[in-house]
Image: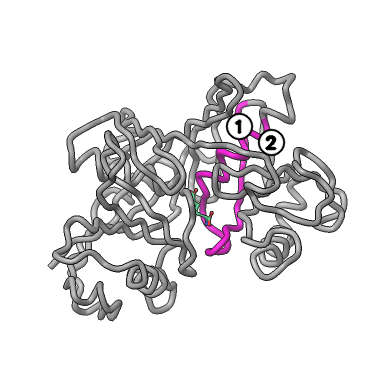
Amino acid sequence: MVTIQKVHGSQNQFFLLDQTTLQQPLTQEELVILAKNITNSQTGLLGGADGLLVVSNSQHLPALGKMQVINADGTIASMCGNGLRTVGRYLAEKYQQNDFIVETEQADLKVTCQADWAPDVKAISVEISPVSFQRAALPFDNLGTEQLISQPVPVLASDLKFTAIAVPNPHLISFVSAKILAGDLLKNLGTKLNQANPYFPDGVNVSFAQIINEQQLFVQTFERGVGFTNACGTGMSATSLAFALIHPELNIFDRLLTVYNPGGYVQTRVHQTDNHYWIELIGNATITHYLDLNENDLHHATIDPAQVKITPTVEDAAYQQFIKDRRP
Ligand SMILES: N[C@@H](CCC[C@H](N)C(=O)O)C(=O)O
């Protein structure tokens, strides 16, 4: 038997599998099939999830471990901010460390345990980097520009301005009115840009944001490889950077922002060091369930829910109580 976890950051939900606990680690092909099956909202476990977080040993000393992110549709994401917080918590508890590095697909990133936000609401801070605005890093094509920072893009939507940032996974951001946020545009644009299209050949995470005040944003994301999510950590981080760049008069750099999302909120702090940007992303890292299952079933992704021993924790109730009175 092996134990996997169901976890969330701002209710962006994942299964977390530590390959080092297996007698035989899953192959990459097995991991992709498992991710697609286990996250399916109809046929997966516990109502599915947004992705699978795979923990393995890192060869990059002194990293404590390595995280791979597999979206619900089986595509690989170079980074996941909410996911890194939960992987960070997992590694912190496994190795009893509070401040360490985790290897991700493109960067080795800093993870720091925070004081609990409330009883049973664990909090973790993670580094979001590297940041790029270059067309090739997103990538995007046929938009007539090499960078997109608060520019109109009529082929995407009339009357909106867009910012494109890789952190390093790709994000397209627009600050919009409450009316636009309540409408269908985000769904339509997210859907269009995440199927074959001439603009974002690898797809893109699309976020619409509202400025509540100079310290508070609300962000809703249509995620590549997933669809609507409760929250996207890298999306909220990229949106915080876009906010700082578009509004230099507000002196956002190095100051704590609160970023609300449909699943709760996170805090971000945008930094510019020398000539590069990076973002601190701080938020909950919640374990909702432990799942004990047969290792063979993981390899074959034939998981009969009746054969899985599911042990819920008290943490989701604590999280729900915590955010209840803190919504904007
Ligand atoms: N929810 C994540 C981002 C997950 C990856 C994304 N779907 C992609 O393909 O880039 C986050 O919290 O950052």
Residue sitting at x 55%, y 21%? 273
- In reply to whether residue 225 is colored magenta, the answer given is yes
Residue sitting at x 46%, y 62%? 71
Which quadrant holds residue 241? Answer: top right
Which quadrant holds residue 18? Answer: bottom left
Q: Is residue 292 above or below residue 100?
A: below
Tags 1 and 2 in contact by the CB under 8 Å rule?
A: yes
Taking the image as shown, residue 4 lies to the left or right of residue 9, namely: left
Which region of the structure is painted magenta? Answer: 215-243
Q: Secondary structure at mark 1?
A: strand
The spot of residue 178 in percent (x, y) is 73, 47
**Label number found at residue 211:** 2
The spot of residue 139 in percent (x, y) is 66, 52
Question: Viewer-proximal residue, 214 or 207?
Answer: 207
User: Does mark 2's beta carbon lie closer than 8 Å to ligand 1?
Assistant: no
Q: Earlier in the sequence, mark 1 or mark 2?
A: 2
Q: Amino acid at mark 1?
A: Gln
Number of numbered markers = 2
Residue sitting at x 33%, y 51%? 316
